Amino acid sequence: MNATELKSLAKQLGADLVGIAPRERWADLPPNQNPLSIMPQCQSVIVLGRKILRGAFRGVEEGTNFGSTYNMYGQSWMEFTFMPRVVIAITNEIESTGAEAVPMSGGTPAGENVSINVNTMANLAGLGAVGKGGFFLTRQYGIRQRFAYILTDAVLDGDPIDTPDFCDGCDACIKACPLNAYRPDNSIDTKLCNACSNGRTGGSALSCAPLDRFAASCGRACIVATEDKIQEKFSSPFRKRAVWTRDFFGVPTVTPLEDGGK
């Protein structure tokens, strides 16, 4: 199975994004971050993405429903029910060709000897890059995807590395943060993030986003700011009403759309 055949198969099996990072791009990573520490004969890392449906953010955006919209369909079921089915199906197909493959989730539990950064691998696989707000951005969906990956000893052609320029001249995510968690050096105060009640949710260590900010004020602001830049288009804008936020103490503020939108 070559790279083209694998990507076609992955799309058929439910992947929305597929990228390949060949060994020469990551072979020199430190042992505790290196695929070779898990699979010494690894030649390729296949990074798989599934898009987070825009509608999964709707309840949080409106401030009306968090659990059965984003928390389930955007986060929990998305990452631990839907995504594993894609990963295991593709891994099975690879092994049916005689190659070995190791299925991996997007995150690593604490205490493991090796922790591979899935965003680093997604970048090396040509799927996009981490932007100013700390979100991984793809040209197809902006921030709206979750990743998992597969290690394999199959030699596969890599994809060109791509760096979307969505953040040039844009501070939407930074301005949207009601807790001022973004520092001047572009790092993020994770203690403040963990106190956020604006759509931030607790993520699992197995998740590609242990600190899940996709549906928080910053993430939703990025969705608004990039909706005309990404490839997946919609007939109506994501933001339709006034913008709600809560400060550190939970006190709410509502900003009219003309001020809180684009």
Image (cartoon, grey):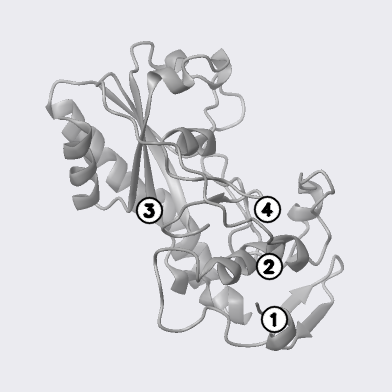
Number of residues whose C-alpha sits closer than 10 Å to that of mark 4, classed few (under 14), some (14–19) or many (20 or more) = many
- According to the picture, the residue beneath numbered tag 4 turns out to be 133
Q: Residue at x 46, y 63 (%)?
A: 230
Asked whether disc 2 touches disc 1, contact meaning CB atoms under 8 Å apart, the reply is yes
Asked whether disc 3 touches disc 1, contact meaning CB atoms under 8 Å apart, the reply is no
Give how far across and how far down residue 81 sits, in percent: 36, 52
Asked whether disc 4 touches disc 2, contact meaning CB atoms under 8 Å apart, the reply is no
- According to the picture, the residue beneath numbered tag 2 turns out to be 217
Q: Residue at x 55, y 13 (%)?
A: 31
Q: Secondary structure at mark 2?
A: helix
Q: How many marks?
A: 4
- Disc nearer the start of the sequence (2/1): 2
- According to the picture, the residue beneath numbered tag 1 turns out to be 243
- Disc nearer the start of the sequence (4/3): 3
Q: Seen from this angle, which residue lies furthest top?
A: 40
Q: Please, what is the three-letter code of the amino acid marked with disc 4? A: Gly
